[in-house]
Structure formats: structure tokens, C-alpha cells
Image (cartoon, helix red, strand yellow):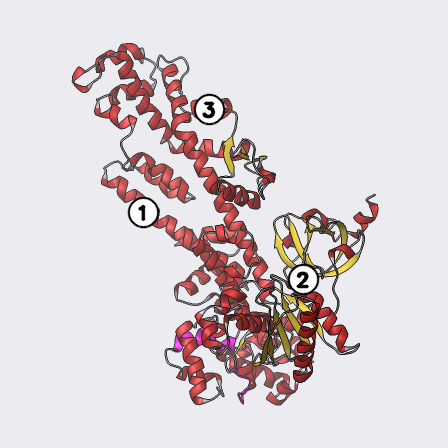
Amino acid sequence: MRSIVKTLAAELGKSEEHVGNVVTLLDEGNTVPFIARYRKEMHGTMDDQTIRTLADRLNYLRNLETRMGEVKRAIEGQGKLTEELAAAIDAAATLAEVEDLYRPYKQKRRTRATVAKEKGLEGLAATLFAQERDCPLPQEEAKKYLDPEKDVTTVEEALAGAGDIIAEWISENAEIRKALRAFLVRYADVSVKAAEKDPEDTVYRNYYKFSAPVCKVQGHQVLAFNRGEREGILKAEITISREAALGVVVRRSVKSPACNSSEFVERAAEDAYDRLIFPSVEREIRSMLTDAASEGAIGQFALNLRPLLMQPPVKGFVTMGLDPGYRMGCKVAVVDKTGKVLDTAVVYPTMNERKKQECIAELSRLIKRHAVKHIAIGNGTASRETEQMTVELIASLGHGCGVSYMIVNEAGASVYSASPLAAKEFPDYDVNLRSAVSIARRLQDPLAELVKIDPKSIGVGQYQHDMPEKRLSEALDGVVEDCVNAVGVDVNTASASLLSRVAGLNASVAENIVKYREENGPFSARRQILKVKGLGAKAYEQCAGFLRVPESKNVLDNTAVHPESYGAAEKLLGICGYTDRDVRAGDLKELRARMKAYGEAKLAAECGVGVPTLSDVASELMKPGRDPRDELPAPLLRTDVLEIKDLKPGMELKGTVRNVIDFGAFVDIGVHQDGLVHISEICDRFIRHPSEVLSVGDVVTVWVKAVDPQKNRISLTMRKEKLRREP
């Protein structure tokens, strides 16, 4: 354990004490949100993402340690474990290195070398491979091993068998494999071509003649040609000069060029390279590239998911959700400011002009009847036509009606609407109307609605269906958990889906919380949560700080102050001259100044907590019940729409970032088709990845660079000065 902590500390750039504390906290069953928020003194204020990275690496290193033990025991069972080999296994930094060391001792299928050993040729191979100064000529030594009973009748047969044995020894040498792998990673190329001589035009056209260094190929490229290869459209391979790569193997196999057997060993090394080592290492490198690309894509998906979930809610307004469609019509749902369904309808704005006018009339009636302020439009099929109809609808209501709309990412809405969860929530509505409700609620509170959907279905990644499912789910579930706990959850209004994402709670306990409040009325204090079936002391410790009880008499129950720090909060207020009434009135503007004047370290000591915890408590007291999303830029609401034909190069527009990928970002500019800002067009300084500058949900200013109506492509730039310089 000590070595693992030391390794983690070095990798993360953290102190061994803090890393060791996090490991202990994780082993004790504490959740990442709880550790990140309420144990800052123990880990030096690491954020939740760093702690998750630590937890992932901890798991890998422990698995590595376990595998080391298994391999040593297996080799020891064969009586072949030496001190040098044990030390090499212990020094291995990756599972691949451990497997390389174990390779010679694994039980294998029957090989050419196995057959040669059965013929008694291992001694011949050992003599020739040793390459001693007095080594006899291979042909002379081979005569000693002729044995008709073992089917070794000629010198050539004996030498061929010995060559097979030496080739296998060379291919199983961990140092040789490691050196060749490193050489290929540094100098080889990934070459991709079309599987057919005259390929059709497909989405893989850019890879019909593609080549890139292994060390520089991009993750999205790897995932693209992998998929093309699986579909039989592409063929990919690792390419390098055979002579150069073979030299890596030969130099480590031939000990003395002047030895009588050196030429024979060199031929065996060539055979090992061509037949055994290169094909195997090529597969390893392809697998390594895929793993790295998958981890990168998962990381980017998680990076995109976080700001999408944390989009500022559009609270306190009656909202209309439109789920566009052609043949089945546009599904309509009106929900009140709490998300309760007030009305539903189905209209047909895309069939003909008469139907569109009927649609406008019906929606106008619903807007006036329920005082609708915002319209959320799903961005799927028929979204463009529905958006155009909405603009006409708003115009018909007259200037100053105060109604606006926003295109909402509807990814996963259909999955949710057909789920048992949606059926339980809306038993009286069909599948299509449920999705309209979900779209309306996504505008009102994206986080509360999106937690009901499998994160993989939200659609802000790339190649997510090609990812290792378990790893992707773990990463995305972690993001959802972090976001939910960062915002906090009202225990009296939250759905079971939202409650289940709170640290320390699971689906069954979340259901029990909902059942308890249905049977007993709203919770009136945090401590009352302990009465819920299945929620014990440990779960309460983990979840309490993330659950809000606005109805409680204790104002701290509606903050992120953990119950274990209530005493500290009360002392802080008393020392600084404040009361609960001041907290409720939001009249603590001078709290920070008074804390500084008193001395924060001294104040923390008197309150019995660390300085980081005291600072967090003060922040909560100054803004009880605050939603961190309210501090972010408001989403972009529109009242008009553009057609792609309206766009001209140089036109300035406001847009919302919908997706961030390896080579750029897609931005919604009020046209049905999102525009692409290539990574080179994001900013004037060099960036390795668009996520260094942009996040999903960002409202940005862009300029039209080029438009291709035929291919429905819009090229945008965020570099106005560059646009001016271009002819």
C-alpha cells in the first residue's frame, strides 16, 4: 500500500499524506462527493475530478499488484521463479509488462517450437543460442540430434526445429518485446486504405488513403478507422521499414557476430520477427491506440456532459414543450413552473399551410390560457419547420408578448419516454406526449430532467457506442453524481431519479424517501430523513449535506453545511455578531470582513474546524439555498430564426455551443444545421483541444466563414481579425 500511495502522489503531484488519507476514506466506504466537499482538510482541497482520477488509478494499481502476485505464484509453482525474475515483475509499471514477463511460462497451445522440443531438439537450440566462443558449427552440432524414431532424419530437419525453438524464445523475451514496442510507437505509421479497389463515397472517404505516425494519430481518427474496419470499408495496419524494426530484434538476439552460430541465430530472429513478434506487437499497439482513444473520448464525453447538466435553469415560468415530427405531428405539452403538466395537444405544422395556421391558432390559445412565457423545441426531426412555425406564432402574438423560444437537445427523450420510469411518472400519457413534457422540463431544469436518462443517450460525445460500456457508464455516472451533489437536492420535491444520484443513496432508498413524504407529508428537518427505511447512519452522513429542506425551522437545513458542522456555523455567527434571522434575511455582507479582522485561522480553531471548511460554511451562510447554476450565463432564448440561405460570409451571430469534439465545436446559431468552428478557428493562441476554451452550453460570438447549402455545411470562426485578413 505504501508504494501505491507513493506512486499516486507522484502521478497527481499531491502529498503522500493527502493521498493516503483519500485512499483510507475511499476504503471506509465514503463517496467521492462527500470526500471532496466535507473532508477538505484531509486531502488538501482536491476537487471531485482529481479524487475520481485517484480512485481509478488506485483500482488499476491494486489490480496490477494482484496480478503480480498471481504471476509470481504461477511461476513459483513451476519451480522457475528466480530472485531476478521476481524483482523484474515487482518493478513492472503496467499490466502489459507483467504479461510480457509471464509469457515464457504460460501454458500454450501446440506450436512449432513445442513439436521441436518433443523431438529432443531443445539442447541443440540452447547450444546454438548461447553463442559461446567455442560454439561448434550448426551443421556439425545438429548431427548429434539425428533420431529417426523421433522423426529427425536430416541435419536440415534438426536445424529447422532448433530455429523454431530459438524464434519462440526470442519472441517471448520481455526486453525485446518492450524495445520493439517502444520503437514502433516512436517511428511507425498507422496506414489506412479502402478495403475495395474502387470504393463508394462514404463517411470514411477521408481514410481511403490515410497515414499518420503512431505517436501523433488523433483519438477520433483511431475510432473512425476502427469502425470503418469493422464495417468492412477500411483496412488499417502498422507500417514501418522492416529492416529498421528487424534491427531492434537482431541486435538484442545476436551476441557475437563472429560466433559460428550467429548467422543461424540471426535467421531465427528474422523468423521470430516476421512470424511471431511483429504481428503480436502490432495487435498490442492497435489495442493501445484504441484504449487511449476510448479513454480520450470518454473523458471528452464527461467533459461535455458536465456543462450540459449544469446549464442554468429557466425557473419560475410556465413552459411549452414541442416535440417535432412529420407524419405523427408535433407533440405539445404545457407545464407549470414546477414542471407539473397543465395541458397537452398534437398539432401538424408541417403538412400544409392550412394545418400550420391551425397549429398556430391552437398554440396561441394554449399560450394565452396558461400564460406561457417560454417554448422549448426539440432539435430532432422536423425541428427546422417547427422552429419556423414558432417564429410566426410569436409574431402573431404581437410585439411585446414576452414569449421566446430555445432549441433544446432532445437526445434521449424518446428513450426516456418509452422507459418504465416515464410510464410510472405519466401513466395517462402516451409515449409521444411524455417526450414533449421532458423537452419542456429540460429548459426549466436540465439537471433534474436529464438524470432520468442514461447518460450515454444524451448525445454530447463522439463514438460513444464504440466505447467500453462499463468504463463509459462509470465515468458518466460519476459526472452526474458530482453535478447533482454540487447543486443540491430539495428532498421534498425531487424525483426518485434525482434522489438516487445523491451521495450515499441508491434507487431503493430514493424510492423510500418519496414514499415516506407521500405518506407523512413534507420533511420538516434533515434529521427526519433518518426515519426513512433503509437509510442508516453511514448513508445519512454521506447524503445529509446534499439534501435541502426549505421547510425546516433550522436555516442550515437548506444549505450545504453538513450537520456535523452546525455547531461550527452557530459559533461563527455568534463570534461575528449575527443571528439566524440575519441569515434568512441575507444580511451577512460583512461576514468575510469580520472573519478576516478576527483572524480566519484563530476563528477556525475556536469553531473546531479547518479553514477550508469554515470558508465553505461562510459561503453557505451568505447565500442560503443558493443554486451554483444561477451564477452562470443565462441560456440564449430567441424570437426569430435564420435560414441557411440567409447566411453570408462575415456575418456576426450569437450561438450556443452544442458539442465539443477533438477537432472543433458545433455551435447552434439559430439555423437548423449547427455550424462547425474548427479548432484552428477558436482562438489566436495555440490550443491542444477545443475544451481548453469552450464548454457545452457556452454562449459565444461567431462569424460566418463559409456556407455550403448543397451539403448543408456551415463553417464558423471565432477569430474576427483572421476573417478580416483573409481575401
Q: Secondary structure at mark 3?
A: helix
Q: Name which of mark 2 and mark 3 comes first in the sequence.
A: 3
Residue 30 percent coordinates (x, y): 43, 68
- Tell whether label 1 touches label 2 (CB within 8 Å): no
The vertical placement of 171 against 642, above or below, is: above
Residue depth check, mark 2 versus mark 3: number of the one nearer the observer: 2
Residue neighbourhood size for the residue with mark 2, other residues' Cα within 10 Å, grouped as few (<14), some (14–19), many (≥20) = many
Residue 223's x, y, as percent?
53, 45
Residue at the spot 43% in from the left edge and 60% down from the top edge: 23
Give the magenta-colored segment's residue range.
536-554
Question: Does the magenta-highlighted stretch encompass residue 553?
Answer: yes
Name the mark on residue 384.
2
Q: Is residue 473 magenta?
A: no
Q: Which residue is labeled 3 in the image? A: 246
Residue 192 screen position, x and y as percent: 54, 35
Q: Taking 677 as reference, is 404 above or below it?
A: below
Q: Which residue is mark 1?
A: 69
CA–CA distance between discs 2 and 1?
Answer: 60 Å
Q: Position of residue 74 (x, y in %)?
A: 27, 42
Label 3 – label 1 distance at C-alpha: 34 Å
Badge nearest the viewer, 2 or 1: 2
Q: Earlier in the sequence, mark 3 or mark 1?
A: 1
Query: At numbered mark 2, what does the secondary structure look like: helix, strand or loop?
Result: helix
Residue visible at 35% across and 12% down in the picture: 260
